[in-house]
Amino acid sequence: MTSQQKPPFIIGITGGSASGKTYFMKKLIESFSEQHICRLSQDNYYRPINEIPRDENGVANFDLPEAIDHQLFARHIAELRQGNVVQQKEYTFNNPLLEPKVLTFNPLPIIIVEGIFVYYYPEVARLIDLKIFVDTKEYVKIKRRIIRDNNERGYDLDDVLYRWEHHVAPTYEKYIKPLRSEADIVINNNHRFDTGLEVLVAYLKTKVEAV
């Protein structure tokens, strides 16, 4: 990045598991050209399965802050801010049907940093210019989680419900919900988020035009 170039504007998007962060982010990205916006997901920074903490029943708990290589995550965000291209291997949640790709992230004018712990890690939070929290009712989230984990990760219903009760819900209450008050914008996503999305897109377009 030259002295005349502005650093990327970094947006954080967080919320409870299955709150609709990914769909909201997808609609946000669709509002810009590929030359203007880049997404960096916390999901690709999980530690290897042998390093994931396990609960009292020996089940891997992906819903804990220590399951994420947050130092590498922060380092990559900082690299993008400095104008550098970064690469990271896709995390497939140990799904044998998926072949992991090497993902390339470019330092575009807008960088979206997404994940349930993006405000929890100080190294990551301090790099974020605008913090967004996607808020959704519990029953909506669990319905979405059942569908997603079955389709994308191959978990059956009993497994999903076990993880929700023992991993997901406690993590939300302890680590994620308390950080809602630190968000600059709260998007209610129980049914639709059109108005919130429109306001955000209009604001971000001023950032793109200023580049």
Image (cartoon, helix red, strand yellow):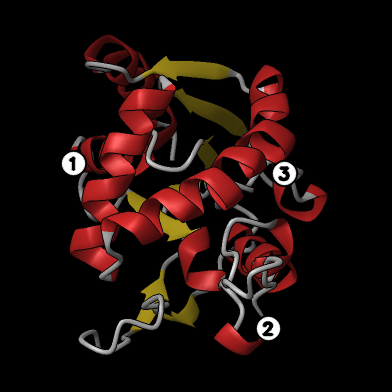
Q: Which residue is mark 2?
A: 51
Local secondary structure at mark 1: helix
- Residue kind at label 3, given as amino acid type: Ala
Gap between marks 1 and 2, in whole Å?
35 Å
Tell which tag, 3 or 2, sits nearer the viewer.
Answer: 2
Image height check: is 103 above or below 200? below
Sequence-wise first label, 1 or 2:
1
Q: Are marks 3 and 1 in contact (CB under 8 Å)?
A: no
The answer to whether residue 119 of the structure is visible from this angle is: yes
Camera-nearest residue between 179 and 71: 179
Task: Count up the numbered dots.
Answer: 3
Where does residue 125 sit, x and y in percent of width and height?
72, 44
Q: How dense is the environment of label 1, judged by Cα within 10 Å: few (below 14), some, or many (20 and up)?
A: few
Q: Which residue is mark 3?
A: 125
Image height check: is 203 above or below 13? above
Q: Are marks 3 and 2 in contact (CB under 8 Å)?
A: no
Q: How dense is the environment of label 2, judged by Cα within 10 Å: few (below 14), some, or many (20 and up)?
A: few
Gap between marks 3 and 1, in whole Å?
25 Å
Q: How dense is the environment of label 3, judged by Cα within 10 Å: few (below 14), some, or many (20 and up)?
A: some
- Residue kind at label 2, given as amino acid type: Glu
Q: Which residue is mark 1?
A: 30
Camera-nearest residue between 80 and 189: 189
Q: Quadrant of residue 120?
A: top right
Where does residue 131 sit, x and y in percent of width and height?
59, 30
Camera-nearest residue between 61 and 22: 61
Q: Mark number for residue 127?
A: none
Local secondary structure at mark 3: helix
